[in-house]
Amino acid sequence: MLNILKQYYPIRNIIFFMIEGAVIFFSVLLALVIFTYSNSFLFDLFIILRISVVTVVCQISLYYNDLYDFEVASTVSEMIIRLMQSLGVTSIALAVIYFYFPMVIIDEVIFALSIFLLLVFVVAWRLIYISILNKGMFNESIVILGSSRLASDILNEIDTHLDCGYTVMAVIPDSIHGHVNNNSEPVNKRIADRELINVDKTEFCDAVINMGVRKVVEALQDKRSFFPAEELLKCRVAGVDVIEGTTFYEMLTGKLPVTFINPSWLIFSSGFRKSGFKAFIKRLIDIVASLILIVLLLPLLLITAFLIKIDSKGQILFAQDRVGQNKKEYMMYKFRSMKQNAEKTSGPVWAKDNDDRITRVGRVIRKFRIDELPQLWNVLTGTMSMVGPRPERKHFTDQLEKAIPYYSERFTVKPGITGWAQVCYDYGASVEDAIEKLNYDLFYIKNMSIMMDVVIILRTIKTVLFGRGAR
Protein backbone atom coordinates (compact mmCIF):
# COMPACT_ATOMS: atom_id res chain seq x y z
CA MET A 1 0.00 0.00 0.00
CA LEU A 2 1.18 3.51 -0.84
CA ASN A 3 0.63 6.42 1.57
CA ILE A 4 -0.47 9.53 -0.33
CA LEU A 5 -1.75 12.51 1.68
CA LYS A 6 -2.54 10.31 4.70
CA GLN A 7 -4.57 7.85 2.62
CA TYR A 8 -3.40 4.43 1.58
CA TYR A 9 -3.77 3.27 -2.01
CA PRO A 10 -2.93 -0.17 -3.41
CA ILE A 11 0.32 0.01 -5.38
CA ARG A 12 -1.59 -1.92 -8.05
CA ASN A 13 -3.85 1.15 -8.57
CA ILE A 14 -0.84 3.43 -9.02
CA ILE A 15 0.65 0.99 -11.51
CA PHE A 16 -2.69 0.88 -13.35
CA PHE A 17 -2.67 4.68 -13.73
CA MET A 18 0.93 4.66 -14.97
CA ILE A 19 0.34 1.81 -17.43
CA GLU A 20 -2.76 3.51 -18.78
CA GLY A 21 -0.68 6.65 -19.32
CA ALA A 22 1.83 4.51 -21.23
CA VAL A 23 -1.00 2.96 -23.30
CA ILE A 24 -2.22 6.43 -24.27
CA PHE A 25 1.32 7.61 -25.03
CA PHE A 26 2.18 4.66 -27.26
CA SER A 27 -1.21 4.77 -29.02
CA VAL A 28 -0.38 8.28 -30.21
CA LEU A 29 3.20 7.24 -30.94
CA LEU A 30 2.01 4.26 -33.02
CA ALA A 31 -0.26 6.50 -35.10
CA LEU A 32 2.64 8.86 -35.68
CA VAL A 33 5.00 6.01 -36.61
CA ILE A 34 2.48 4.63 -39.14
CA PHE A 35 2.12 7.93 -40.96
CA THR A 36 5.74 8.92 -40.57
CA TYR A 37 6.80 5.65 -42.22
CA SER A 38 4.33 5.97 -45.06
CA ASN A 39 5.26 9.60 -45.77
CA SER A 40 8.98 9.32 -44.98
CA PHE A 41 8.80 11.94 -42.23
CA LEU A 42 11.46 12.09 -39.53
CA PHE A 43 10.64 12.56 -35.83
CA ASP A 44 11.19 16.16 -34.75
CA LEU A 45 12.70 17.29 -31.45
CA PHE A 46 9.30 18.08 -29.91
CA ILE A 47 7.73 14.67 -30.47
CA ILE A 48 7.93 13.56 -26.82
CA LEU A 49 6.48 16.89 -25.69
CA ARG A 50 3.64 16.71 -28.22
CA ILE A 51 2.63 13.19 -27.26
CA SER A 52 3.01 13.97 -23.53
CA VAL A 53 0.57 16.88 -23.86
CA VAL A 54 -2.02 14.57 -25.41
CA THR A 55 -1.41 11.96 -22.68
CA VAL A 56 -1.75 14.41 -19.78
CA VAL A 57 -4.87 16.10 -21.17
CA CYS A 58 -6.46 12.72 -21.91
CA GLN A 59 -5.83 11.35 -18.41
CA ILE A 60 -7.18 14.51 -16.83
CA SER A 61 -10.34 14.09 -18.94
CA LEU A 62 -10.60 10.45 -17.88
CA TYR A 63 -10.33 11.47 -14.21
CA TYR A 64 -12.92 14.23 -14.47
CA ASN A 65 -15.30 11.85 -16.21
CA ASP A 66 -15.05 9.33 -13.33
CA LEU A 67 -13.20 6.69 -15.34
CA TYR A 68 -10.87 6.09 -12.40
CA ASP A 69 -13.85 5.32 -10.18
CA PHE A 70 -14.59 1.66 -10.85
CA GLU A 71 -17.90 1.83 -8.98
CA VAL A 72 -19.12 4.33 -11.61
CA ALA A 73 -17.48 2.90 -14.75
CA SER A 74 -18.18 -0.72 -13.84
CA THR A 75 -19.79 -1.96 -17.05
CA VAL A 76 -18.38 -2.14 -20.58
CA SER A 77 -21.14 0.07 -22.03
CA GLU A 78 -20.73 2.72 -19.33
CA MET A 79 -16.96 2.64 -19.74
CA ILE A 80 -17.12 3.09 -23.53
CA ILE A 81 -19.65 5.94 -23.30
CA ARG A 82 -17.58 7.79 -20.72
CA LEU A 83 -14.39 7.12 -22.65
CA MET A 84 -15.86 8.59 -25.84
CA GLN A 85 -17.06 11.62 -23.87
CA SER A 86 -13.57 12.01 -22.41
CA LEU A 87 -11.95 11.80 -25.84
CA GLY A 88 -14.34 14.50 -27.05
CA VAL A 89 -13.36 16.75 -24.15
CA THR A 90 -9.70 15.93 -24.84
CA SER A 91 -10.12 17.05 -28.46
CA ILE A 92 -11.67 20.36 -27.41
CA ALA A 93 -9.03 21.00 -24.74
CA LEU A 94 -6.22 20.22 -27.19
CA ALA A 95 -7.74 22.56 -29.78
CA VAL A 96 -7.52 25.38 -27.24
CA ILE A 97 -3.93 24.44 -26.33
CA TYR A 98 -2.94 24.24 -30.02
CA PHE A 99 -4.40 27.69 -30.62
CA TYR A 100 -2.10 29.25 -28.03
CA PHE A 101 0.87 26.88 -28.44
CA PRO A 102 1.05 25.83 -32.10
CA MET A 103 4.49 24.25 -31.65
CA VAL A 104 2.86 21.21 -29.94
CA ILE A 105 0.31 20.54 -32.70
CA ILE A 106 -0.04 16.98 -33.97
CA ASP A 107 -1.21 16.53 -37.56
CA GLU A 108 -5.01 16.11 -37.72
CA VAL A 109 -4.79 12.80 -39.62
CA ILE A 110 -2.38 11.41 -37.04
CA PHE A 111 -4.62 12.70 -34.27
CA ALA A 112 -7.71 11.03 -35.79
CA LEU A 113 -5.90 7.68 -35.94
CA SER A 114 -4.65 8.26 -32.39
CA ILE A 115 -8.23 8.64 -31.14
CA PHE A 116 -9.21 5.36 -32.78
CA LEU A 117 -6.20 3.52 -31.37
CA LEU A 118 -6.81 5.06 -27.95
CA LEU A 119 -10.37 3.81 -27.91
CA VAL A 120 -9.31 0.28 -28.86
CA PHE A 121 -6.26 -0.06 -26.61
CA VAL A 122 -7.67 1.68 -23.55
CA VAL A 123 -10.88 -0.38 -23.64
CA ALA A 124 -8.83 -3.58 -24.05
CA TRP A 125 -6.50 -2.60 -21.20
CA ARG A 126 -9.39 -1.73 -18.90
CA LEU A 127 -11.19 -4.99 -19.61
CA ILE A 128 -8.02 -6.83 -18.62
CA TYR A 129 -7.69 -4.74 -15.45
CA ILE A 130 -11.35 -5.17 -14.43
CA SER A 131 -10.89 -8.92 -14.85
CA ILE A 132 -7.88 -8.69 -12.51
CA LEU A 133 -9.99 -6.75 -9.98
CA ASN A 134 -12.87 -9.21 -10.14
CA LYS A 135 -10.52 -12.11 -9.48
CA GLY A 136 -8.86 -10.26 -6.61
CA MET A 137 -5.43 -10.75 -8.13
CA PHE A 138 -2.62 -8.93 -6.29
CA ASN A 139 -4.99 -8.07 -3.41
CA GLU A 140 -3.55 -8.10 0.09
CA SER A 141 -5.16 -10.87 2.14
CA ILE A 142 -6.38 -9.95 5.62
CA VAL A 143 -8.18 -11.60 8.53
CA ILE A 144 -10.61 -9.61 10.65
CA LEU A 145 -10.55 -10.41 14.35
CA GLY A 146 -13.92 -9.55 15.86
CA SER A 147 -17.61 -9.38 15.01
CA SER A 148 -18.40 -5.79 15.98
CA ARG A 149 -20.28 -3.19 13.95
CA LEU A 150 -16.88 -1.80 12.98
CA ALA A 151 -15.90 -5.22 11.61
CA SER A 152 -19.13 -5.24 9.61
CA ASP A 153 -18.47 -1.78 8.19
CA ILE A 154 -14.92 -2.75 7.19
CA LEU A 155 -16.32 -5.81 5.40
CA ASN A 156 -18.89 -3.63 3.65
CA GLU A 157 -16.27 -1.13 2.47
CA ILE A 158 -14.06 -3.89 1.07
CA ASP A 159 -16.96 -5.69 -0.61
CA THR A 160 -18.37 -2.56 -2.27
CA HIS A 161 -15.08 -1.08 -3.49
CA LEU A 162 -13.70 -3.23 -6.25
CA ASP A 163 -10.28 -1.58 -6.26
CA CYS A 164 -9.69 -1.26 -2.50
CA GLY A 165 -6.79 -3.73 -2.71
CA TYR A 166 -7.87 -6.12 0.07
CA THR A 167 -9.41 -9.58 0.25
CA VAL A 168 -10.93 -10.75 3.54
CA MET A 169 -9.87 -14.38 3.89
CA ALA A 170 -11.84 -15.00 7.07
CA VAL A 171 -13.45 -13.48 10.14
CA ILE A 172 -12.51 -14.69 13.60
CA PRO A 173 -15.54 -13.73 15.73
CA ASP A 174 -15.51 -12.63 19.34
CA SER A 175 -15.18 -15.85 21.32
CA ILE A 176 -17.98 -15.31 23.77
CA HIS A 177 -19.41 -18.60 25.00
CA GLY A 178 -17.88 -20.26 21.93
CA HIS A 179 -19.95 -18.43 19.27
CA VAL A 180 -20.43 -15.08 17.59
CA ASN A 181 -21.91 -12.38 19.77
CA ASN A 182 -25.57 -11.99 18.80
CA ASN A 183 -26.18 -8.45 20.00
CA SER A 184 -26.69 -7.10 16.47
CA GLU A 185 -28.53 -9.06 13.80
CA PRO A 186 -27.44 -6.92 10.78
CA VAL A 187 -23.80 -7.37 11.79
CA ASN A 188 -24.21 -11.11 12.16
CA LYS A 189 -25.92 -11.42 8.78
CA ARG A 190 -23.12 -9.64 6.97
CA ILE A 191 -20.42 -11.50 8.84
CA ALA A 192 -22.28 -14.77 8.39
CA ASP A 193 -21.78 -14.39 4.64
CA ARG A 194 -18.03 -14.72 5.21
CA GLU A 195 -16.03 -17.73 6.25
CA LEU A 196 -15.96 -17.79 10.06
CA ILE A 197 -13.14 -19.40 11.96
CA ASN A 198 -14.18 -20.44 15.45
CA VAL A 199 -10.88 -21.15 17.15
CA ASP A 200 -9.68 -20.98 20.69
CA LYS A 201 -8.11 -17.63 21.50
CA THR A 202 -4.82 -19.40 22.11
CA GLU A 203 -4.76 -20.87 18.58
CA PHE A 204 -5.87 -18.26 16.05
CA CYS A 205 -2.36 -17.02 15.24
CA ASP A 206 -1.40 -20.43 13.85
CA ALA A 207 -4.59 -20.43 11.77
CA VAL A 208 -3.73 -16.99 10.36
CA ILE A 209 -0.16 -18.02 9.49
CA ASN A 210 -1.36 -21.26 7.87
CA MET A 211 -3.62 -19.23 5.55
CA GLY A 212 -0.63 -17.17 4.42
CA VAL A 213 -2.18 -13.96 5.70
CA ARG A 214 0.18 -11.12 6.64
CA LYS A 215 -2.29 -8.67 8.21
CA VAL A 216 -4.78 -9.01 11.08
CA VAL A 217 -7.35 -6.25 11.65
CA GLU A 218 -8.55 -6.14 15.26
CA ALA A 219 -12.20 -5.08 15.48
CA LEU A 220 -13.40 -6.78 18.66
CA GLN A 221 -16.81 -5.99 20.03
CA ASP A 222 -15.80 -6.17 23.70
CA LYS A 223 -12.08 -6.05 24.43
CA ARG A 224 -12.69 -6.52 28.14
CA SER A 225 -14.27 -9.93 27.61
CA PHE A 226 -11.94 -11.11 24.87
CA PHE A 227 -8.58 -9.60 24.01
CA PRO A 228 -5.99 -12.25 23.05
CA ALA A 229 -2.87 -10.21 23.77
CA GLU A 230 -0.53 -13.21 23.68
CA GLU A 231 -1.78 -14.40 20.30
CA LEU A 232 -1.62 -10.90 18.81
CA LEU A 233 1.94 -10.54 20.08
CA LYS A 234 2.76 -13.96 18.62
CA CYS A 235 1.43 -12.82 15.24
CA ARG A 236 3.36 -9.58 15.40
CA VAL A 237 6.64 -11.31 16.26
CA ALA A 238 6.01 -13.80 13.44
CA GLY A 239 5.90 -10.92 10.95
CA VAL A 240 2.13 -10.53 10.68
CA ASP A 241 0.96 -6.91 10.80
CA VAL A 242 -1.60 -6.27 13.53
CA ILE A 243 -3.61 -3.10 13.05
CA GLU A 244 -6.37 -1.64 15.19
CA GLY A 245 -9.72 -1.58 13.39
CA THR A 246 -10.37 2.16 13.61
CA THR A 247 -6.93 2.95 12.19
CA PHE A 248 -7.47 0.49 9.36
CA TYR A 249 -10.90 1.99 8.65
CA GLU A 250 -9.33 5.45 8.44
CA MET A 251 -6.70 4.20 5.96
CA LEU A 252 -9.31 2.37 3.92
CA THR A 253 -11.98 5.06 3.63
CA GLY A 254 -10.43 8.49 4.19
CA LYS A 255 -12.73 9.18 7.13
CA LEU A 256 -13.02 8.50 10.86
CA PRO A 257 -15.86 6.41 12.33
CA VAL A 258 -16.99 8.81 15.06
CA THR A 259 -19.51 6.33 16.45
CA PHE A 260 -16.72 3.80 17.17
CA ILE A 261 -13.69 5.82 18.23
CA ASN A 262 -12.95 6.63 21.85
CA PRO A 263 -11.03 9.63 23.25
CA SER A 264 -7.88 7.58 23.90
CA TRP A 265 -7.63 6.63 20.21
CA LEU A 266 -7.83 10.29 19.19
CA ILE A 267 -5.32 11.30 21.86
CA PHE A 268 -2.66 8.74 20.93
CA SER A 269 -3.16 8.54 17.16
CA SER A 270 -0.94 10.45 14.77
CA GLY A 271 -2.07 13.71 13.21
CA PHE A 272 -3.61 16.95 14.52
CA ARG A 273 -0.27 18.66 13.90
CA LYS A 274 -0.58 22.43 13.84
CA SER A 275 2.05 25.15 13.69
CA GLY A 276 2.19 28.89 13.35
CA PHE A 277 4.09 28.58 10.07
CA LYS A 278 1.44 26.30 8.51
CA ALA A 279 -1.31 28.64 9.70
CA PHE A 280 0.54 31.61 8.16
CA ILE A 281 0.99 29.87 4.80
CA LYS A 282 -2.66 28.76 4.72
CA ARG A 283 -3.82 32.30 5.52
CA LEU A 284 -1.51 33.76 2.86
CA ILE A 285 -2.89 31.35 0.26
CA ASP A 286 -6.45 32.25 1.31
CA ILE A 287 -5.80 35.98 0.81
CA VAL A 288 -4.07 35.58 -2.56
CA ALA A 289 -6.57 33.01 -3.88
CA SER A 290 -9.66 34.99 -2.80
CA LEU A 291 -8.32 38.22 -4.35
CA ILE A 292 -7.49 36.54 -7.65
CA LEU A 293 -10.85 34.74 -7.82
CA ILE A 294 -12.83 37.89 -6.99
CA VAL A 295 -11.13 39.72 -9.87
CA LEU A 296 -11.40 36.84 -12.37
CA LEU A 297 -15.01 36.01 -11.47
CA LEU A 298 -16.25 39.61 -11.31
CA PRO A 299 -18.20 39.36 -14.62
CA LEU A 300 -19.90 36.17 -13.40
CA LEU A 301 -20.70 37.81 -10.06
CA LEU A 302 -22.29 40.82 -11.79
CA ILE A 303 -24.32 38.67 -14.21
CA THR A 304 -25.55 36.49 -11.35
CA ALA A 305 -26.57 39.55 -9.32
CA PHE A 306 -28.49 40.94 -12.32
CA LEU A 307 -30.33 37.63 -12.93
CA ILE A 308 -31.31 37.29 -9.27
CA LYS A 309 -32.67 40.83 -9.26
CA ILE A 310 -34.92 40.35 -12.31
CA ASP A 311 -35.99 36.79 -11.35
CA SER A 312 -37.60 37.46 -7.96
CA LYS A 313 -38.22 40.15 -5.40
CA GLY A 314 -35.76 40.57 -2.58
CA GLN A 315 -32.12 41.26 -1.86
CA ILE A 316 -29.34 39.96 -4.11
CA LEU A 317 -27.10 38.84 -1.27
CA PHE A 318 -28.24 36.66 1.58
CA ALA A 319 -26.47 37.01 4.95
CA GLN A 320 -26.90 34.35 7.60
CA ASP A 321 -25.27 33.59 10.94
CA ARG A 322 -22.75 30.76 11.05
CA VAL A 323 -20.54 29.25 13.75
CA GLY A 324 -16.85 29.56 12.92
CA GLN A 325 -13.52 28.73 14.50
CA ASN A 326 -13.58 28.54 18.30
CA LYS A 327 -17.41 28.74 18.09
CA LYS A 328 -17.32 32.42 17.17
CA GLU A 329 -20.41 33.46 15.25
CA TYR A 330 -20.13 35.50 12.06
CA MET A 331 -22.24 36.48 9.07
CA MET A 332 -21.74 34.34 5.98
CA TYR A 333 -22.69 35.76 2.57
CA LYS A 334 -24.32 33.92 -0.33
CA PHE A 335 -26.25 34.86 -3.42
CA ARG A 336 -29.94 34.57 -2.57
CA SER A 337 -31.23 31.36 -4.15
CA MET A 338 -34.54 31.13 -2.28
CA LYS A 339 -37.60 33.32 -2.08
CA GLN A 340 -37.34 36.30 0.22
CA ASN A 341 -38.13 35.35 3.86
CA ALA A 342 -38.16 31.65 2.91
CA GLU A 343 -38.02 30.58 6.56
CA LYS A 344 -40.61 33.01 7.87
CA THR A 345 -43.18 30.29 8.57
CA SER A 346 -41.03 27.16 8.82
CA GLY A 347 -38.12 28.48 10.89
CA PRO A 348 -34.58 27.17 10.35
CA VAL A 349 -34.69 23.96 8.28
CA TRP A 350 -32.28 22.13 6.01
CA ALA A 351 -32.86 22.37 2.26
CA LYS A 352 -34.43 19.29 0.68
CA ASP A 353 -34.77 17.79 -2.79
CA ASN A 354 -37.05 19.82 -5.09
CA ASP A 355 -37.41 22.49 -2.40
CA ASP A 356 -40.25 24.80 -3.48
CA ARG A 357 -38.57 27.74 -1.74
CA ILE A 358 -35.79 27.81 -4.36
CA THR A 359 -36.17 30.28 -7.25
CA ARG A 360 -35.56 29.52 -10.95
CA VAL A 361 -32.18 31.24 -10.95
CA GLY A 362 -31.51 29.74 -7.54
CA ARG A 363 -31.69 26.19 -8.92
CA VAL A 364 -29.00 26.96 -11.47
CA ILE A 365 -26.61 28.78 -9.18
CA ARG A 366 -27.01 26.13 -6.45
CA LYS A 367 -26.35 23.33 -8.94
CA PHE A 368 -23.01 24.85 -9.92
CA ARG A 369 -22.25 26.34 -6.47
CA ILE A 370 -22.28 29.88 -7.84
CA ASP A 371 -24.36 30.93 -4.83
CA GLU A 372 -21.31 30.26 -2.62
CA LEU A 373 -19.00 32.73 -4.43
CA PRO A 374 -19.73 35.76 -2.15
CA GLN A 375 -18.01 33.74 0.60
CA LEU A 376 -14.74 34.76 -1.05
CA TRP A 377 -15.27 37.97 0.91
CA ASN A 378 -15.48 35.92 4.13
CA VAL A 379 -12.20 34.26 3.16
CA LEU A 380 -10.56 37.61 2.44
CA THR A 381 -11.67 39.04 5.81
CA GLY A 382 -10.50 35.94 7.70
CA THR A 383 -13.72 34.43 9.04
CA MET A 384 -13.45 31.54 6.59
CA SER A 385 -10.81 29.64 4.64
CA MET A 386 -10.84 28.30 1.10
CA VAL A 387 -10.79 24.74 2.52
CA GLY A 388 -12.26 23.52 5.80
CA PRO A 389 -15.42 22.00 7.29
CA ARG A 390 -18.55 23.67 5.98
CA PRO A 391 -20.05 26.04 8.58
CA GLU A 392 -23.47 25.45 10.10
CA ARG A 393 -25.97 27.72 11.83
CA LYS A 394 -25.99 27.84 15.61
CA HIS A 395 -29.55 26.51 15.60
CA PHE A 396 -28.23 23.28 14.09
CA THR A 397 -24.83 23.09 15.79
CA ASP A 398 -26.44 23.22 19.23
CA GLN A 399 -28.55 20.18 18.33
CA LEU A 400 -25.72 18.31 16.59
CA GLU A 401 -23.26 18.79 19.46
CA LYS A 402 -25.71 17.01 21.77
CA ALA A 403 -26.46 14.21 19.29
CA ILE A 404 -23.03 13.49 17.75
CA PRO A 405 -19.81 12.66 19.62
CA TYR A 406 -16.78 14.88 18.86
CA TYR A 407 -18.89 17.32 16.85
CA SER A 408 -17.34 20.27 18.67
CA GLU A 409 -13.91 19.33 17.27
CA ARG A 410 -15.02 20.87 13.96
CA PHE A 411 -14.64 24.28 15.54
CA THR A 412 -10.88 23.92 16.05
CA VAL A 413 -10.26 25.09 12.47
CA LYS A 414 -11.77 27.75 10.23
CA PRO A 415 -14.77 26.71 8.17
CA GLY A 416 -14.25 26.59 4.42
CA ILE A 417 -15.99 27.31 1.14
CA THR A 418 -15.26 23.70 0.27
CA GLY A 419 -14.00 20.75 2.28
CA TRP A 420 -13.12 17.06 2.36
CA ALA A 421 -16.70 16.15 3.29
CA GLN A 422 -18.08 18.20 0.38
CA VAL A 423 -16.00 16.37 -2.25
CA CYS A 424 -16.53 12.93 -0.70
CA TYR A 425 -20.19 13.08 0.32
CA ASP A 426 -23.37 14.58 -1.13
CA TYR A 427 -25.42 17.32 0.48
CA GLY A 428 -26.61 16.34 3.97
CA ALA A 429 -29.97 17.25 5.47
CA SER A 430 -30.29 15.01 8.53
CA VAL A 431 -28.48 14.00 11.69
CA GLU A 432 -27.32 10.80 9.94
CA ASP A 433 -25.84 12.87 7.13
CA ALA A 434 -24.20 15.17 9.65
CA ILE A 435 -22.53 12.16 11.31
CA GLU A 436 -21.17 10.94 7.98
CA LYS A 437 -19.89 14.40 7.07
CA LEU A 438 -18.24 14.69 10.48
CA ASN A 439 -16.41 11.44 9.73
CA TYR A 440 -14.78 13.18 6.77
CA ASP A 441 -14.31 16.52 8.55
CA LEU A 442 -12.41 14.90 11.43
CA PHE A 443 -10.20 13.07 8.94
CA TYR A 444 -9.38 16.43 7.35
CA ILE A 445 -8.69 18.15 10.67
CA LYS A 446 -6.48 15.24 11.74
CA ASN A 447 -4.48 15.17 8.50
CA MET A 448 -4.81 18.69 7.09
CA SER A 449 -1.97 20.00 4.93
CA ILE A 450 -1.46 22.40 2.04
CA MET A 451 -1.22 19.51 -0.43
CA MET A 452 -4.47 18.04 0.86
CA ASP A 453 -6.11 21.45 0.35
CA VAL A 454 -4.87 21.42 -3.26
CA VAL A 455 -6.39 17.95 -3.82
CA ILE A 456 -9.71 19.11 -2.32
CA ILE A 457 -9.81 22.18 -4.57
CA LEU A 458 -9.10 20.05 -7.67
CA ARG A 459 -11.88 17.65 -6.67
CA THR A 460 -14.18 20.63 -5.98
CA ILE A 461 -13.67 21.79 -9.57
CA LYS A 462 -14.80 18.35 -10.69
CA THR A 463 -17.89 18.54 -8.44
CA VAL A 464 -18.78 22.03 -9.66
CA LEU A 465 -18.30 21.24 -13.36
CA PHE A 466 -20.77 18.38 -13.17
CA GLY A 467 -23.14 20.04 -10.69
CA ARG A 468 -23.20 17.10 -8.28
CA GLY A 469 -24.62 16.94 -4.78
CA ALA A 470 -26.53 20.24 -4.80
CA ARG A 471 -30.07 20.85 -3.57
Image (cartoon, grey):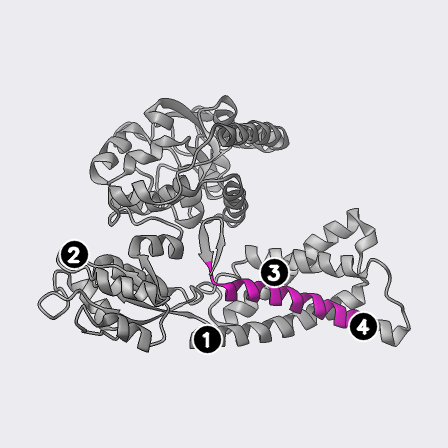
Q: Are marks 3 and 4 in contact (CB under 8 Å)?
A: no
In the image, which is nearer the foreground, mark 2 or mark 3? Answer: 2
In the image, which is nearer the foreground, mark 3 or mark 4? Answer: 4
Dot 1, crowdedness within 10 Å: few (<14), some or many (≥20)?
A: some
Residue 11's spot in the image, x, y percent? 51, 63
Task: Name which of mark 2 and mark 3 comes first in the sequence.
Answer: 3
**Gap between marks 2 and 3, in whole Å?**
50 Å
Please give the name of the residue rendered at 50% of the width and 68% of the height, measured from the top-left corner.
78
Examine the image and state in which quarter residue 122 appears: bottom right
SS for dot 1: loop
Give amino acid for label 1.
Met
Give the farthest residue toward the right.
40
Which residue is labeled 4 in the image? Answer: 33
Give amino acid for label 3.
Ser
Task: Name which of mark 4 and mark 1 comes first in the sequence.
Answer: 4
Please give the name of the residue rendered at 62% of the width and 28% of the height, measured from the top-left corner.
295
Please give the name of the residue rendered at 17% of the width and 64% of the height, measured from the top-left corner.
174
- Can residue 347 be seen in this snapshot? no
**Which is nearer the eye, 366 or 86?**
86
Residue 349's spot in the image, x, y percent? 28, 35
Residue 137 numbered tag: 1
Which residue is labeled 2 in the image? Answer: 222
Q: Are marks 3 and 1 in contact (CB under 8 Å)?
A: no
Task: Name which of mark 3 and mark 1 comes first in the sequence.
Answer: 3
In the image, which is nearer the foreground, mark 2 or mark 4? Answer: 2
Q: Is residue 420 above or below residue 176?
A: above
Residue 338's spot in the image, x, y percent? 39, 33
The span picked out in magenta is 9-34
Which residue is labeled 3 in the image? Answer: 86
Dot 4, crowdedness within 10 Å: few (<14), some or many (≥20)?
A: some
